[in-house]
Image (cartoon, coloured by chain):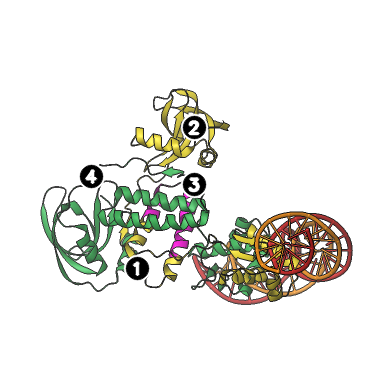
Chain colours: A yellow, B green, C orange, D red
Amino acid sequence: MSRSSRLLLLLQNLTTGRRPVTAARLAAELNVSERTVYRDIAELASLGVRVDGEPGVGYLLKPGFFLPPLMLTEDEAEAVLLGLDYVDQRGDEVLLQAGLNARAKIQAVLRSAAGSRASVRLSSPGPPAPPAFPENAVPLSRLRAAIRSQTKLGLTYRDAQGAESMRTAWPIQLAFLHNARILIAWCELRKDFRTFRTDRILSIRERERYPEPRAALLRRFRAEHGAVET
Amino acid sequence: MSRSSRLLLLLQNLTTGRRPVTAARLAAELNVSERTVYRDIAELASLGVRVDGEPGVGYLLKPGFFLPPLMLTEDEAEAVLLGLDYVDQRGDEVLLQAGLNARAKIQAVLRSAAGSRASVRLSSPGPPAPPAFPENAVPLSRLRAAIRSQTKLGLTYRDAQGAESMRTAWPIQLAFLHNARILIAWCELRKDFRTFRTDRILSIRERERYPEPRAALLRRFRAEHGAVET
DNA sequence: AGACTCCTGACAGAAACCGACAGGGAGCGA
DNA sequence: TCGCTCCCTGTCGGTTTCTGTCAGGAGTCT
């Protein structure tokens, strides 16, 4: 028996039972030594399976590896799929790919769910506005990483009048408009929120982590500026 | 990267697309030689995955799934939630409510998976374009019902020049643009597809069911008119 | 016919797998 | 406190598997 098939069996063994299973029992089940079971459990964990091992008890699977059935009504499914259509029109490569994968996963669970029959799409997003977005000098993935890690950015920007400027800003979110992508950030100089079209960002430099939690900054931004100006 | 994780990735790659994938493409994706992809495919097959490989075409997964889909990744969750944000901006009452419910269900699943650490949103849809959509004389729900039941509509329409007209049309889909809602339909008179702004539809009258399946009409529409004109 | 593509076999170095053995530590009941 | 059950980790060495490369064969599409 190949290792992968054993891992699969192991996963299924853990998935089926809701009672903890001991490594010894699994070892007997799979015809391998106990040591190997430990190694296999570690391998599963490295694959993203959240398996909880307690001394004196055994192994128990925590939810979070598989996508649970997700009972969506017809309208709800339509809303989700329509939303993903919009993302297809406006998202960058990362979001596009993620949207594709998410769509596949959600449609899979919808199909499996009893009662919700796959129906032909009722709504569509309409025509995509621009065929292509302006090039970014700085890839969005780098901005995304900075947002995720709450990293201050020293950024060089060319504004609508063509004037270049440098400043330090705390990036908090990316906005995907129909014709542009915009970085929302707290500007240290102005002590206020500013928005930057990503295609006008000439270069960035990652600095240290900013202290205020991003969630708090976002709340403040939304409270002060209801909307994002282009 | 361990073999098992590669097999998992491979499986997801196959699950995602409905178009055949070549071994060469998979090899590039997984950073592995083509030969290894063949071996891995064979391994998956031996595990029970029903994968169909056709010379000159590529690999395609046969319907019926092997494993339930995996939990949404961070990016995928972001894509879905961002999509629902767009729906919030453009959808009608029905879609809005459905979007709200869908969001709640999906976030419940995500919370159970992420184990407390719900990450702050990385992207936003930008500002909503118009504060309100023009009134519809005919409620969208009635149009939706007609689309669902494939019911021919006798509709009175006032075009952009203000001229009123009557015609029989087969409604197939609603498009939710940033500034308008549009009914896509097959026009019996013109024997072609036509689009109607819902706010210019003065009245409708439900008639009998139209024969051609809506899915087929939609395919034809998408093939002929790549996009929806306003 | 020619371009693609799936598929198989063989080889050899590299990598991993696996059982055996030895311990450590957490929790629980007596 | 002791004993027990289990999870967990480390090491060793023989064995197996894995993987890229090379060399073909055969089916499908344009």
Chain label for disc 1: A
The residue that mark 3 highlights is B119
Q: Secondary structure at mark 1?
A: loop
Q: Quadrant of the N terminus of chain A?
A: bottom right
Q: CA distance from mark 3 to mark 1?
A: 32 Å
| Residue count near mark 1 (Cα–Cα under 10 Å), binned few <14, some 14–19, many ≥20 | few
Query: Identity of the amino acid at label 3?
Result: Ser
Horizontal relation, residue A29 to residue A89: left or right: right
Determine which residue is flagged by label 4: B132
Q: Numbered disc 3: what chain?
A: B
Residue drawn at 59 percent across, 71 percent down:
A12
The residue pinned by badge 2 equals A170
Q: Nearer the viewer, residue B100 or B15?
A: B100
Q: Residues within 10 Å of mark 4 (few under 14, many from 20)?
A: few
Q: Position of residue A201 (x, y in %)?
A: 48, 32
Residue beneath label 1, please?
A: A119
**Residue A229 in view, yes or no:** no
- Picture layout, residue A31 above or below residue A157: below
Bounds of the magenta segment? A83-107
Q: Quadrant of the C terminus of chain A?
A: top left
Closer to viewer: mark 3 or mark 2: 3
- Give me the residue at 43% from left, 56% from top: B108
Query: For the residues carrying marks 4 and 1, which lies nearer the camera in this image?
Result: 4
In the rendering, which numbered label is found on residue B113?
A: none
